[in-house]
Image: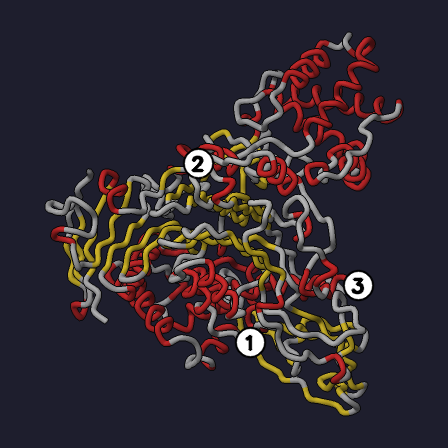
């Protein structure tokens, strides 16, 4: 165990820190550490917090987040204040304008008295830990932040910012469908989740797979930790600027979330007064818009000023042809944003997770839950307004009449939900509820369309592959669960290999005069059909699929690919004929020859492997990577790669961000990894250690969340003196 003792007194005597190896305690949190607030770090640099009370534990969590992500933590708070341009420059202005439109910080202050009092006490303790760390380490505070302190309203504002992320996307999509570009970038999100019941588990316990797919950088970069504080015990991840476990498990319950849910936002089209465009028509009379002047500080440039307009529906997000378009958000008055996470963190069984969804403080998501009592549960949750019938709520609706006003909110009991399905498994990898399993009872005819949230039969490669694995496995072992979490076999791949065989059978006599065709074709036909980092066949397949799209266009290739892949086959639907006509075979063969020529030109040989192109890394170091995303190569081990670099590599930038397997035995067993590392300090051994040792090799690591597991893996120990 590495020892690095140091002592420091902080102003006002609020904190006393000791760091180094424990000399008396056999287990973390016992012996001389019993009753103390201790921040242990394991050999991956992950924080393990042991504290006598929840408040003391969340104090340590705030401290640890600031220690690991000193600038990223403050960047997240700044984003919630509409100040990202302070550190991003001009590129942050548009996002800051959106944040200022919804005034997250102002709403947090105005609603400060609402919500559970214990949650507010927890947030205050968390904030105190953050501020005490920066007081002890002023060199870690970036100049752009200034000398201000973090306050509890910033935490609520960040919660609102994240809560709004999905709803603003829904509102802007309504605007686009109305033929108006909102001028804001569309955020791509995705995730995986599945659960199996004890009846389909080899360990006679439920198993949950948690796998959010977000950016590896910026506001959505998760932070890993464990906590044992008073009544709070668990493991998982959260976002810097957030208290509590965001995704993971406590001692009784595990929970996962994937994008896809009910409609929680609308756009209202307002008719403006001819001689005064700051007034809009409503029930035969004109109402005055509100106005606010905002100034945004911009790194390296002059401040940006703007006038923001608002209506009783919400902020004006577009002006076109004598009309203003207002975004109405169901979360407009939501300040109890941490109440739902409180319920998750302290849940005793799946009903506690249901209580979290009853708060209507979760963004539109597919939430899947497993508990140590053997239950698996699903809800398509969100804060859903009751809408009058007769209107197309997927496009801007007429805002000049009270007839289109919302009529309250749906309770969570109205949501799409399911407990312990007889199939013994569920999955939702951003698909519609009717294809979550074979013979799913969650059909759209049972719900209003805006609650159901998507059309029937909407499947993708990840969902199809998950069903294929789970439907055919009636006794999932822990080893299988860990393998499924990082599975790199694209759904439909056997049918694509059948197409290759057709090409070779029909045209091989002529094409085999080309030695590169022979080498490429033979390698692919012998390939194990997995996108492994060491596979030359996987790289050839990537080059072929890329060339097909280049030659024939995304739309045409998408149509052909759907027919070949037949993703609904695992759900029992008959697979269409995969036979190609002569013209299609000639075209596919020509693309294959071109692909092999390009591969050889890029890498100097046809022997290059998948990991020679696909990489995971940070700064100037990278490692080979398996798994794919996009262009027909999407796998459960999902990674979205950046553009091709000059050296023909493509580095991962999003996808699996904090993959977890939770086995709901008593006690819970769990494994996880991050794509890069938990620390943002370049001199830390944990700056990119998980990229090299876990993510590249598709190896989830044990969480060591119990003290007896952690005891042999402690790297450092810090005692914190929490003074409320």
Q: Nearer the viewer, mark 3 or mark 2?
A: 2
For the residues marked 1 and 3, what is the alpha-carbon distance in whole angstroms?
28 Å
Give the residue pinned by disc 2.
Answer: 478
**Secondary-structure class at tag 3:** loop
Q: Is residue 5 above or below residue 637?
A: below
The residue drawn where x is 78% and y is 72% is 320
The alpha-carbon separation of the residues under discs 3 and 2 comes to 49 Å
Q: Which one is in front, 469 or 298?
A: 469
Q: Quadrant of residue 587?
A: top right
> Circle 1 sits in a helix, a strand or a loop, which is it?
strand
Which residue position holds label 1? 294
Whether residue 73 is visible to the viewer of this picture, yes or no, is: no
Compared with 367, 506 (above or below) is above
Mark 3, other Cα within 10 Å: few <14 / some 14–19 / many ≥20? few
Q: Nearer the viewer, residue 548 or 112?
A: 112
Q: Name the foreground residue: 435 vs 719.
A: 435
Task: Name above or below for residue 456 compared with residue 85.
Answer: above
Q: Contact (CB < 8 A) between labels 1 and 3? A: no
> In x, y percent, where is residue 249?
41, 52
Q: What is the number of the mark on residue 179? A: 3
Q: Residue at x 80, y 25 (%)?
A: 588
Q: Sequence-wise, which precedes: disc 1 or disc 2?
A: 1
The answer to the question of whether label 3 and label 2 lie on touching residues, with beta carbons closer than 8 A, is no
Q: Position of residue 642 (x, y in %)?
A: 59, 40
Which mark is first along the chain, 2 or 3?
A: 3
């Amino acid at each position: 165990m590495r020892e690095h003792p140091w002592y420091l007194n902080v102003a006002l005597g609020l904190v006393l820190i000791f760091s180094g190896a424990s000399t008396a305690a056999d287990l973390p949190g016992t012996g001389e550490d019993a009753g103390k607030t201790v921040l242990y770090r394991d050999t991956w640099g992950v924080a393990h917090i042991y504290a006598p009370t929840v408040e003391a534990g969340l104090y340590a969590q705030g401290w640890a987040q600031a220690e690991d992500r000193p600038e990223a933590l403050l960047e997240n708070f700044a984003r919630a204040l509409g100040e990202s341009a302070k550190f991003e420059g001009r590129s942050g202005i548009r996002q800051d304008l959106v944040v200022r439109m919804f005034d997250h910080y102002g709403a947090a202050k105005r609603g400060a008295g609402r919500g559970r009092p214990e949650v507010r006490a927890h947030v205050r303790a968390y904030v105190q830990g953050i501020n005490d760390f920066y007081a002890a380490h002023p060199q870690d505070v970036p100049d752009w932040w200034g000398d201000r302190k973090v306050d509890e309203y910033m935490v609520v504002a960040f919660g609102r910012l994240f809560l709004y992320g999905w709803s603003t996307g829904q509102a802007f999509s309504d605007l686009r469908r109305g033929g108006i570009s909102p001028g804001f970038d569309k955020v791509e999100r995705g995730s995986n989740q599945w659960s199996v019941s004890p009846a389909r588990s080899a360990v006679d316990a439920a198993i949950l797979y948690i796998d959010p797919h977000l950016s590896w950088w910026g506001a959505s970069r998760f932070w890993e930790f464990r906590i044992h504080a008073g009544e709070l015990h668990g493991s998982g991840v959260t976002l810097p600027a957030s208290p509590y476990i965001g995704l993971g498990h406590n001692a009784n319950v595990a929970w996962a979330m994937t994008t896809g849910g009910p409609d929680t936002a609308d756009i209202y089209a307002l008719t403006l007064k001819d001689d005064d465009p700051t007034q809009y028509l409503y029930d035969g009379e004109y109402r005055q818009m509100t106005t606010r002047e905002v100034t945004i500080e911009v790194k390296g440039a002059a401040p940006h000023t703007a006038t923001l307009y608002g209506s009783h529906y919400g902020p004006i997000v577009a002006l076109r042809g004598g009309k203003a378009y207002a975004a109405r958000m169901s979360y407009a008055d939501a300040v109890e944003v941490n109440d739902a996470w409180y319920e998750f963190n302290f849940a005793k069984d799946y009903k506690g997770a249901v209580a979290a969804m009853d708060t209507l403080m979760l963004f539109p998501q597919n939430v899947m839950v497993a508990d140590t009592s053997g239950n698996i549960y699903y809800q398509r949750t969100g804060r859903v307004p009751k809408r009058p019938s007769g209107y197309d709520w997927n496009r801007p609706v007429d805002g000049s009449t009270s007839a289109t006003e919302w009529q309250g909110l749906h309770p969570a009991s109205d949501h799409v939900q399911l407990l312990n399905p007889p199939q013994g498994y569920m999955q939702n990898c951003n698909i519609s509820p009717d294809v979550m399993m074979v013979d799913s009872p969650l059909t759209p005819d049972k719900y209003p369309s805006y609650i159901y949230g998507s059309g029937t039969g909407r499947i993708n490669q990840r969902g199809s592959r998950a069903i294929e694995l789970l439907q055919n496995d009636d006794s999932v072992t822990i080893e299988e669960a860990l393998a499924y979490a990082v599975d790199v076999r694209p759904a439909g791949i056997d049918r694509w290999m059948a197409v290759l065989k057709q090409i070779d059978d029909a045209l091989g006599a002529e094409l085999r005069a080309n030695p590169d065709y022979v080498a490429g074709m033979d390698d692919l036909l012998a390939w194990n059909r997995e996108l492994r980092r060491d596979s030359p066949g996987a790289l050839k397949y990537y080059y072929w699929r890329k060339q097909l799209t280049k030659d024939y266009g995304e739309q045409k290739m998408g149509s052909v690919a759907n027919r070949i892949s037949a993703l609904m086959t695992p759900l029992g639907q008959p697979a269409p004929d995969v036979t190609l006509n002569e013209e299609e075979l000639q075209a596919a063969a020509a693309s294959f020859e071109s692909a092999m020529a390009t591969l050889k030109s890029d890498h100097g040989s046809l022997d290059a492997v998948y990991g020679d192109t696909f990489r995971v890394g940070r700064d100037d170091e990278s490692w080979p990577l398996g798994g794919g995303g996009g262009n027909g190569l999407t796998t459960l081990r999902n990674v979205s790669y950046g553009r091709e670099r000059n050296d023909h590599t493509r580095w991962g930038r999003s996808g699996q961000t904090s993959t977890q397997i939770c086995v709901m035995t008593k006690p819970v067993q769990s494994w996880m990894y991050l794509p890069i590392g938990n620390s943002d300090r370049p001199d830390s051994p944990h700056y990119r250690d998980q990229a090299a040792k876990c993510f590249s090799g598709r190896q989830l690591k044990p969480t060591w969340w119990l003290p007896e597991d952690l005891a042999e893996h402690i790297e450092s120990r810090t005692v914190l003196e929490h003074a409320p």
